[in-house]
Amino acid sequence: MLDSDQQQVPSAPGPSRNAIRAARGKPLYGWVRDSLRRDILQGVRAPHERLATEKELIEAFEVSRITVRRALQELRAEGLLVTAQGRGNFVARPRVTQELRSMEAFGETVTSQIGQADVRLLSLSEVEPPPLVARELRLKPGDRVTAIRQVQHLRSQPVMVSESFLPLAIGRRIFSRDLDIDTLAVLKNRLRIGVRGARIEIEACHPEPVAAAALKLPERASILKLTRVFMDRSGRPFDVESLSFREDTFNCKFCTDPNEE
């Protein structure tokens, strides 16, 4: 904890000497690293923000240059900082890598790599399905679906907008749920729907107006759009999910096995 009357160096909050003595039980570089990491993950330091200089950090934390350099080295290795030659260290934009063969929800991937994602509900309604959704879910003419749109934030920055279309038999069970996690996680973990597989399509495109506004992008910006059609254990499709990512926040990877047909 910082003392309330303590002086602070801009962009480098400094602890009291008592706080330093309290941290003596573990390496000081780890304590400096954790302090800076916490600020980054909580959005106190925004993406692309320039970090304090080594000299400022040394003075603020009252530690050695070796300690500061070790802390910064580990933050760079974690992908939280990037260094521009001659300009200093900058907070990196959060970036997530997802293995497409896994049936993880985006929030589950984020939690394992970066930290808890902040999921916010944009809309929840029953609508007439788009033709693609009606075909994928094997709906009859006149059938309606539950449409759920959410936006996910990492370090207080919007990075992804999701839209899920569900048959009403499933979607109406969602209405009584708090959608504080992404929809796929609700389906798997709260409604206990087993996932056998998914069909996946990836494209680069321009965002729709709602996604552009939520991601704070111009409508002619480029995004990465990931569409997944999930099948339950009986092989019946139950969720058509469309994920719109800022192109600078998402990597996808896919491992193949030459022994698989």
Image: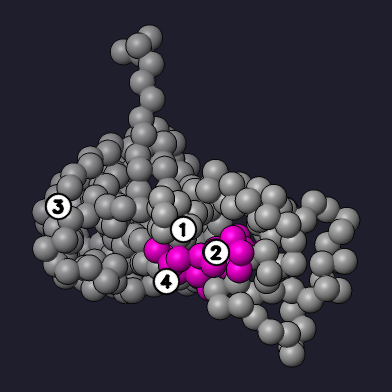
Give the answer, above or below, for where 201 lies relative to 211.
above
Residue displayed at 74% across by 79% down? 2
Which residue is labeled 1 in the image?
Answer: 88
**Cα distance between the residues tagged 1 and 4:** 34 Å
Q: Residue 179 location, x and y as percent? A: 46, 68
Residue displayed at 49% across by 48% down? 79
- Total marks shown come to 4
The disc, 1 or 3, on the residue closer to the chain's N-terminal end is 1
Amino acid at circle 4? Arg
Q: Residue 45 location, x and y as percent? A: 50, 70
Point out the frontmost of discs 1 and 3.
1
The disc, 3 or 4, on the residue closer to the chain's N-terminal end is 4
Is 163 on the left or on the right of 17, as rendered? left
* SS at badge 1: strand
**Towards the viewer: 259 or 132:** 259
Q: Are marks 1 and 2 in contact (CB under 8 Å)?
A: yes
**Cα distance between the residues tagged 3 and 4:** 23 Å
Amino acid at circle 2? Thr
